[in-house]
Image (tube, rainbow, N blue to C red):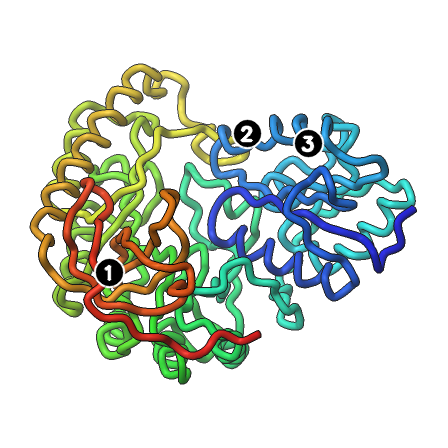
Amino acid sequence: MTSQSESTVYIETYGCQMNVSDSELMLGKLEASGYRQVDAPDVADVILVNTCAIREHAEQRVIGRLGEIKSHMKRGAILGVTGCMAQRLGPAILERASHVSLVIGPDGYRSLPLLVDNARRGARTSSTNFDLEEQYEDFTPRRFDRVKAWIPVQRGCDYRCTYCIVPTTRGSERSRKLDDVVREAESVVAEGMSEVVLLGQTVNSYNDGVNDFGDLLRAIGGVPGIMRLRFTSPHPNDFSDRVISAMAETDAVCEHVHLPMQSGSSQVLKRMLRRYTREKYFECAARLRAAIPGLSLTTDVIVGFPGETDEDFEETLSAVREIGFDDAYTFKFSLRDGTPATRFPASETVPDDVASDRLARLIESVRSNVRDRNLRLLGQRREVLIEKEARRGGLLQARTRDFKTVILPGERSMIGSYATVELTGTTGSTFTGAVVRERKPLPMAV
């Protein structure tokens, strides 16, 4: 058997940014125990698939991937499933896939090295108990991104939207202490990064018992070296006047909010248990835009929710047009076992062909709106942070403060630097740009 000091680990991540952050925590924990990261599963002694359970398609994709990995695992390798799908299905994964040795939910990563060692001795384990005190404060994440840092400030969720599995897979909401988040932000700057993204299921409901989300924004925005501060995903109900004031008055806070709408129909929103109406959502968007000039709004929209009528869908289309989102992530409703939506009568199910048609119409409406908005921005100059190499060779991908993607020419050495660019063209969703002026952030730490 390979000694632990020589052991290698490969982590594959599905789902949201919180899962990415959790993978960074797991990798940091295993590296502290003597494991070395590798970039492919077929050469790894330990393979971890960190999963999402938000939609059935995501789970089916993981199940298929587990089958693919089985045929390429090297002899003696350990395969584990972690994350939300692991929490939801638990030991059933071990029964379904005999080559899986570990199933670990989001609150079980503290025991990861021990569970891996036990698996290498032949034990097969499912660890899916909730620990509502767990915040992994003593973990040192091994960050995948060297330009921006994902920092979780809250775990779990106290909202009970009828379509959502998150309260089942991540438990009740709990917030980290503000001082602990500040310390992590300071460590990020020491590593050479200047952009921070605060993470939570409903991140703006953050409250550590003393401080609210407005206090947190001011504290993190005040950390020397933090040049950009973002957060995801907020809930429309939790934008208090204090929070909006903190956003407007903290220079590092970027001019972008991802504000999930889910539906433009008050009737559907009530059935979703979103706890706001169409009018309240519009009011929230207006308050944000009034406080923060040039604010970019993006959103999430679900079509085909049980009971959604043609009139409800038309209200969603009109909301998309009237609010003028800068982009939208659009989904066809996916029923998840364990969610309250399973209790709706079968007669209220929207036929798949109807839901598919609505999704296509929604996507076209969003794309048309985004294309029109982006065309009006051509010729403007924007500050961008150069994040990575673009998919096309010889080009770089950058991001404006208001979350526009810009593709521009440049050398790899420019990654991590800031530049002023002129927006020279658009595909409708992304921009091309020409560098007008480049400036470097703090030196990257070794």
Residue named by callout 2: 61
Q: Which of marks 1 and 3 precedes in the sequence? A: 3
For the question of whether residue 6 can be seen, the reply is yes
Which x, y percent locates residue 336? 49, 31
Which x, y percent locates residue 35? 76, 58
Which x, y percent locates residue 79? 74, 39
Choose top left, top right, bottom left or bottom right for residue 399: bottom left
User: Relative to 174, is 68 above or below?
Assistant: above
Q: Is mark 2 on a helix, strand or loop?
A: helix
Viewer-side label of 3, 2: 3
Q: Which of marks 2 and 1 precedes in the sequence? A: 2
Neighbour class for label 2 at 10 Å: few (<14), some, many (≥20)?
Answer: few
User: Relative to 311, is 203 above or below?
Assistant: below
- Tags 3 and 1 touching, CB below 8 Å: no
Which amino acid is tagged 1?
Answer: Asp
Neighbour class for label 3 at 10 Å: few (<14), some, many (≥20)?
Answer: some
Which amino acid is tagged 2?
Answer: Arg
Give the numbered dot on residue 245: none
**Looking at the image, which is closer to me, 318 or 258?**
258
Q: Is mark 3 on a helix, strand or loop?
A: helix
Query: Which residue is at 28% across, 47% downward?
Result: 299
Query: Which residue is at 81% across, 51% downward?
Result: 115
Q: Is mark 1 on a helix, strand or loop?
A: loop
Residue named by callout 1: 402
User: Relative to 61, is 285 above or below?
Assistant: below
**Looking at the image, which is closer to me, 235 or 378?**
378
Give the numbered dot on residue 69: 3
For the question of whether residue 205 can be seen, the reply is no
Which x, y percent locates residue 250? 28, 78
Which amino acid is tagged 3?
Answer: Ile
